Image (cartoon, rainbow, N blue to C red):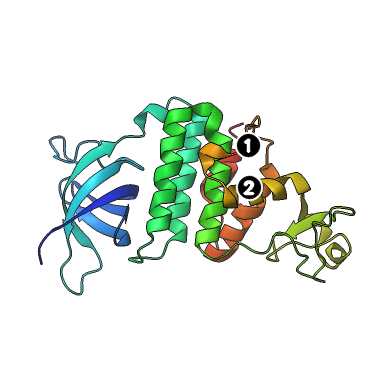
Amino acid sequence: MPARLSEAFVLQTWPFKEGDLIVSFLTRDSGKLRGVARRARRPKSGFGSGLERLSHIKMSYFQRENRELVNIDSCDLLHSQFGMLNDFASACALDFVAEVSEQLLPAAEPSEKYFRLVTTILEHLRSAGPSAVWRAVTYFSIWAVRLAGMLPELHVCLGCGTWLEDPEHPERAFFSRQRAGLYCHDCRRALDLRSTWELTAESRAIAEEILHTPIADLIDRPWTHSTAADLRRFLAQQMEAHIERKLITFSVLEAAA
């Protein structure tokens, strides 16, 4: 089979045999794949820094029939994220994007929209610097959940169907780790109150804005750790329910404020 050349992001690597690496990478045209990079851990490896986390590369690889792992021939570095590692919160944001992508995406299922999402988030983090971390992470989280088909209705109570956005009498909205979706104050009583949190009207408005606005055109507001923190918790719980495990990087990221 002839080699394929694809634009890709490196998601995760694992040592393999003596000097090799298993590489999980997201391609623009074929989705998430895994492959073997021979001799990648040796001092004179031709891969260089191209296999660092979230490196944007041009990768040459081929896949034999009936083989799960592809063989990675070479990669050319297009963009490195090395410059962001000096800031702890930015580094944690990179870890979060990589883990969510690794855990959320199915194997070998193309998603041009998800690839463009990762491209946009990384470009925004590089250009806007550390001040953009919470804006970028929140934007990435809501679109990752949306593209995975897991984003519940944010304007209606899942319990009774009450419209939460009544302009005259807006309802408070709550979410629970055990349930998908949002619940009004009355329906919240049927949940375990010890594991419920409020999703504020302000955060719901931010979510609505993100779903209809490019990241560069969002309202110019001060983005701190507290901005839409409840929304990020809600989205992380949707992801964790889907993948049936805790996201290791989420708590580290939220502690990086």
Local crowd size for mark 1, using a 10 Å CA cut-off: few (<14), some (14–19), many (≥20) = few
N-term-proximal mark, 2 vs 1: 2
Q: Which residue is at a point 51% across and 37% down the rendered structure image?
A: 216
Q: Return the residue found at the far left.
A: 2
**Position of 179 compared to 164: left or right?**
left
Quadrant location, the C terminus: top right
Secondary structure under the numbered disc 1 in the rendered image: loop
216 or 200: nearer the eye? 216
**Position of 247 compared to 169: left or right?**
left
Residue 200 visible to the viewer? no
- Tell me, for residue 44, which label it has, or none: none
Give the residue type that dot 1 points to.
Answer: Ile
84 or 23: nearer the eye? 84
Residue 10, percent from left and from top: 32, 47
86 or 13: nearer the eye? 86
Give the residue type that dot 2 points to.
Answer: Glu
**Residues at marks 2 and 1 touching, judged by CB atoms closer than 8 Å:** yes
Residue 162, percent from left and from top: 82, 66
**Label 2 vs label 1: CA separation?**
8 Å
Location of residue 242 (image quadrant): bottom right
Local crowd size for mark 2, using a 10 Å CA cut-off: few (<14), some (14–19), many (≥20) = some
Q: How many labels does the image show?
A: 2
**Position of 206 compared to 252: left or right?**
right
The residue pinned by badge 2 equals 209
The residue pinned by badge 1 equals 219
Q: Return the residue found at the far top.
A: 86
Location of residue 229 (image quadrant): top right
